[in-house]
Amino acid sequence: MSIIVVLCFKAFHLTAPSTIFTTWVALGNYMNPSIFAATDHYIASLFASEDACLKETLRNNENAGLPEIDVSAVQGKLLQVFAKMCQARYVLELGTLGGYSTIWLARAIPEDGKVITIERNEEYARVARKNIENAGLIHKVDIRVGTAIEVLAELDTELSQSFDMVFLDADKPPYMQYLQWALRHSRPGTIIIADNVIRAGKVLDENSDDPAVIGVQQFNKALAEAAGVTSVVIQTIGVKDHDGMAIAVVDYPQHA
Ligand code: DHB
Ligand code: MG
């Protein structure tokens, strides 16, 4: 088995991404993911233990039938680290779901800061509001119900300041539009994070007809080529599927 893996890894250096994708899918059956989940639990136990409130949030979400696509605890902590790195006071989140990541973010900003979070599903937004109220954070959170495209158009007319940090985690097909919007509402030093940009390696498939894959492929390319931004993507693996987060810091803004 290890010989096969070594041979495949050597071959990876010489092969086109789409071939790597096919090989990876074939290899996938032989990989044991439990080491990644166990390591994630180890990291979480040290750095990202969930208090009763975060645990209750996940329970409430499950009871309300929300999909279990929240960030992991370690990823929630990572969002806090980024928020503190840029001393975020004013944060935009696209895709509230049940408010789990919103709670991590709201806890990382000062009392007079604000997380504006957008959720298109009214029921999810109702569950999120309850979770955020239970966490004692509703004074720092502004939940907007509507599609991200609609709400961003509203915000365009009412905003007077740029965001310190933007977390993209809504539906994937318009990710590139979200990026362009975020860049227009940034200042030097604004941090932009985007979830789910690797999708278990499906981004390597140049012939994908999956709208979510196509959305993040367009996003990754646009981010890599964007002027005035320093950016990278890191793979994420752990209790959630293999995926990735794009991490970007704005060098100079793109005001239209
Ligand atoms: C999906 C969306 C997410 O934001 C996520 O983190 C995982 C999965 C999805 O739509 O499948
Ligand atoms: Mg996500």
Image (tube, helix red, strand yellow):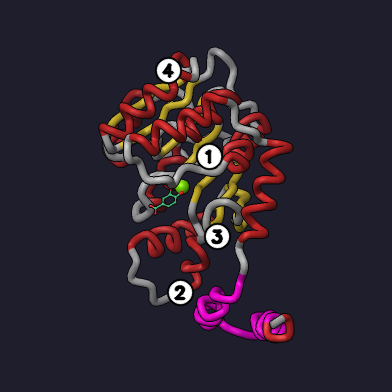
- Residue topped by disc 1: 253
- Residue shown at 60%/63% (left/top)? 33
Mark 2 to mark 1: distance in Å? 32 Å
Q: Which residues are magenta?
A: 5-31
Q: Residues within 10 Å of mark 3 (few under 14, many from 20)?
A: some
- Mark nearer the N terminus (3 vs 4): 4
Q: Could you tell me how many numbered marks the image carries?
A: 4
Residue 7 magenta-highlighted: yes
If you read the primary sequence from the N terminus, does the residue marked by circle 2 or circle 1 appear first? 2
**Local secondary structure at mark 4:** helix
Q: Quadrant of residue 193?
A: top right
Could you tell me which residue is drawn at 65 percent across and 57 percent down?
36
Residue 205 is tagged as 2
Dot label at residue 242: 3
Give the alpha-carbon distance from disc 3 to disc 4, as whole Å.
Answer: 32 Å
Which residue occupies 60% across, 31% down? 50
